[in-house]
Image: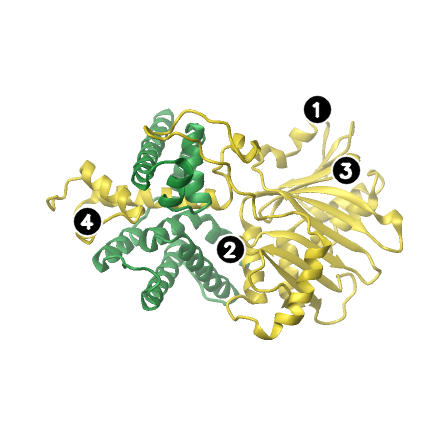
Amino acid sequence: MTDTQRIQQYLQLRSEFMGYLYAITRDAELSEEVYQNAAVVVIEKADSDETIRDFRSWAKEVVRRQALHAIRARELAQRHGRAIAPELLEAISETFCEDDSTASLVHSEATAMQKCVAQLPEEKQKLLAMRYEQDATFDEISRRMNSTPTAIQRSLSRIRKMLHECTQRRLALSEGQQ
Amino acid sequence: MSHTNKFTPETEALILGHFDNGLTDQQESELAQQLVTCPEARVRFRTQMRMEGRLHSLGRDRFLTPVAAQQSSAVDAPGPPLEPGFTTVIESSPPRRIRPVFTSWVAAASIILVLTAWALWPSGVNAASVLRQAQLAAHELVDRTYRVTLSNPSDQAVEQKLTLDLRGGSKFVIRPVDGSYIMGSDGTEFWMTRPDGPVWVTKNYRSLAPALRRRIPNQRILGMATSPSEPLLLDVTELLSLIKRKYEIELVSPHGSPEHHIRARLRSEKVNVPETIEFWADADTGVVIKALTHWPNQDRRMLELLNTAELNETWYQYPLHAPDAQVRRL
């Protein structure tokens, strides 16, 4: 596998890895940092002659190790007040590593979700943009929207649930058509 | 909540709450227990993880802001409330950090700051890490449109402007502003056409040049496009790869700048490659927003990012650009 092919493969797994990283760090900036650090490892390995049979599993392990290292460093630096419960960190990592969803399912899911996002009313899209594009906190969003952080959190939860249901519906529909 | 292995709405609430960092210690333990004992909870958590990852990716690439909001002014007109109690509409997104064109005072200020702050340079960012981040960003399957300017201070006739659309390292469409021809690749085949002419298609890009030498209006561009030493014209990934292989690099911009400026100098004297290459990459995303090559004969080629907007897959295929043209395969 060439340097370019390996990087492309790593990039195709970006959302999957970022989802995991966000689940255990709940910090978009740290997730991005870990993802970039893991990319360095992937690029360095691409320069070596090491044979990698299952790239996805191998890359997952690289990401997991980098993430645990970063979380430990963050705890030492006490950048965050409360760390994730150790048993939950372990359960999430196991859930991530045992995920054997096919590439085609992951791709269909991504396409379906993107369509669902596009169908959301504009106000809900704006809320998503503030949270995921601008990394705004609930406090910041609530100030801009003249609301309360709790109301914003509830709204986002509802949007996520809607997106999940819409995505699953679309997937079921496309399976039925095949 | 009891520790059962049944998936309930409460479990889903725990999963969603987790991604908002809104669970108590007790709730985190309950979620961990659910993930260990309930296969359905694991499936739902995985799906949510993937969704969160995608939402962050879409956000990072600025695909979440509704089109209408992007086009609106800084203060939107009031609309229907999102939830009960909401009385105002969200203000539009702040200006994007990717700025296509640099002003000269920014460049001058950068140089002064480099001279004064060099000794205090922090170790977190270095030229190699910027190059790596730029390579990753260039490989992303995101559509980016650049303006390409060819110039030579001692020869006005050389000046030419083109528009280049890129997706990842393999798909592109390039057009001179006069519309005299259009060239592209969908990742598997290369093609070229001009108004009212046929479409020339080949799997071997290099074969386009000799076959078309007499047929196209601007042979010079085609010569550059098909030259292995002219990656800048068509492919940012190749440009960055060339830098990695053959150039010494230094980080020029001061710490904290919104863009990282890299200057690359050729390690050993070679013909037909630029003497120096400079590029500016967005500090957050690594996306190359400007690149400049300097050649021994004073030729300069410049790329400037115009925008990042999703293009239809068919944009990179010739039927869209020459729907009724005769297809000639080489």
Question: Dot 1: few (<14), some (14–19), or many (≥20) neighbours within 10 Å?
Answer: few
Using the rendered image, report if marks 1 and 3 lie on a common chain: yes
Determine whether label 3 and label 2 are within 8 Å by CB: no
Q: What's the distance in space between the residues labelled 3 and 2, CA to CA?
A: 33 Å
Quadrant that contains the C terminus of chain B:
top right
- In this rendering, would A122 be left or right of B37? right
Determine whether label 1 and label 3 are within 8 Å by CB: no
Residue ID at (21%, 58%):
A87
Question: Dot 4: few (<14), some (14–19), or many (≥20) neighbours within 10 Å?
Answer: some
Q: Residue under label 3, please give it.
A: B177
Question: Dot 2: few (<14), some (14–19), or many (≥20) neighbours within 10 Å?
Answer: many
Q: Which chain is in yellow here?
A: B
Q: Amino acid at mark 2?
A: Ile
Quadrant that contains the N terminus of chain B:
top left
Q: Residue under label 4, please give it.
A: B27
Colour of the chain lettered A: green
Q: Residue under label 2, please give it.
A: A7
Residue ID at (46%, 42%):
B58
Chain letter for mark 3, please: B
Residue B208 visible to an observer of this rendering: yes
2 vs 1, front mark: 2
Q: What's the distance in space between the residues labelled 2 and 1, CA to CA?
A: 38 Å
From the viewer's perspective, is residue A175 above or below residue B47?
above
4 vs 3, front mark: 4
Chain letter for mark 4, please: B
Quadrant hosting residue B175: top right
From the viewer's perspective, is residue A18 above or below residue B177?
below
Q: Position of residue B243 (x, y in %)?
A: 65, 63
